[in-house]
Amino acid sequence: MRLYYMTSYEVALIILRERRMRLARFDNLNDPFELLSASMTDPEVRYLIKYLRDHWVRKIGIICMGLHWKSPVMWAHYARNHTGICLGFDVPDDLAREVRYSSEREQVVLDMAKELRGINSELLQRITTTKYEQWSYEEEWRLFSKLEEKDPVNGEFYLPFGPTMTLREVIVGVRCKAPVGSFRKIIGRPESAIKIIKARPAFDSFTMVQQKNVTPIKISPW
């Protein structure tokens, strides 16, 4: 499936040159309720969720993406007020997890007689992919990866381009000063064909669309 990642122009250049994406930690995301979607009025549940959260923060990294690049609000929030870039990736369907939006906290009932107190994989997935409904405009999907090998220079964790994440599109923000053609040299020779286009506001709706008077560029792997 095709998923999109919005960021600043400066960060996009680093991603394109290094051909890898930095994995975020759950405790560094912009929602303080990450991994805390369960109701924690029960002290036992609160203890368990805290234990799970601490474990996931240490062991699991995340890349947050969107289902499309049309939202002007997403460009404003994540691509420096439309001066940034959106990168479109093909990812395997079975690796992407859709975020579920809810107005209520998850009710967790523990069963002390069962293994892991009755916590199963379905509940764990809901905890890692549930957010408050006011975030629903993001239409978020998530990629998860183990935090295994630190970068020796900056201590961060990365997911390289490859079978898990193949770059296929570069959408240049409407207020980005960099010309579409400048990305050809930055990208170099890719492993798969990449299309580069310029965005603009639509004439008949509140969406971003391709700017047709800017010639798109296609980069082939051969």
Image (spheres, helix red, strand yellow):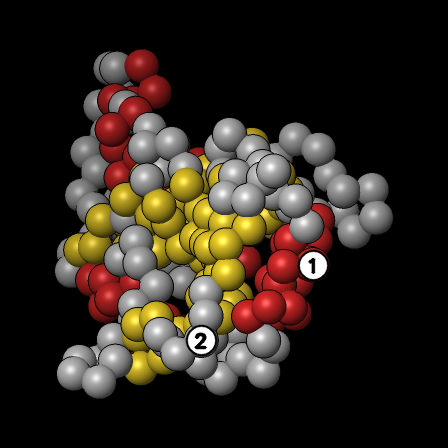
Which is nearer the N-term, disc 1 or disc 2? 1
Q: From this viewpoint, which residue is outermost toward the right?
A: 153
170 versus 47 height, above or below: below
Label 1 Cα neighbours within 10 Å, binned few <14 / some 14-19 / many ≥20: few
Q: Residue 214 carries which label?
A: 2
Q: In this view, does 152 lie to the left or right of 77?
A: right
- x then y, percent, for residue 107: 18, 43
Q: What amino acid does circle 2 point to? A: Val
Answer yes or no: is residue 54 visible. no
The residue sitting at 63% across, 59% down in the picture is 184
Q: Is residue 31 left or right of residue 72?
A: right
Q: The N terminus appears in which quarter of the rendering?
A: top left
Residue in front for this viewpoint, 86 or 146: 86
Q: Residue 185 carries which label?
A: 1
Q: Which mark is residue 101?
A: none
Label 2 Cα neighbours within 10 Å, binned few <14 / some 14-19 / many ≥20: few
- What kind of element bears circle 1? helix
Q: What amino acid does circle 1 point to? A: Lys
- x then y, percent, for residue 58: 59, 39
Q: The C terminus appears in which quarter of the rendering?
A: top right
The residue sitting at 30% across, 68% down in the picture is 70
209 versus 57 height, above or below: below
The residue sitting at 21% across, 38% down in the picture is 108
Residue in front for this viewpoint, 78 or 182: 182
* Figure quadrant of residue 96: top left
146 versus 10 height, above or below: above
- x then y, percent, for residue 117: 29, 22
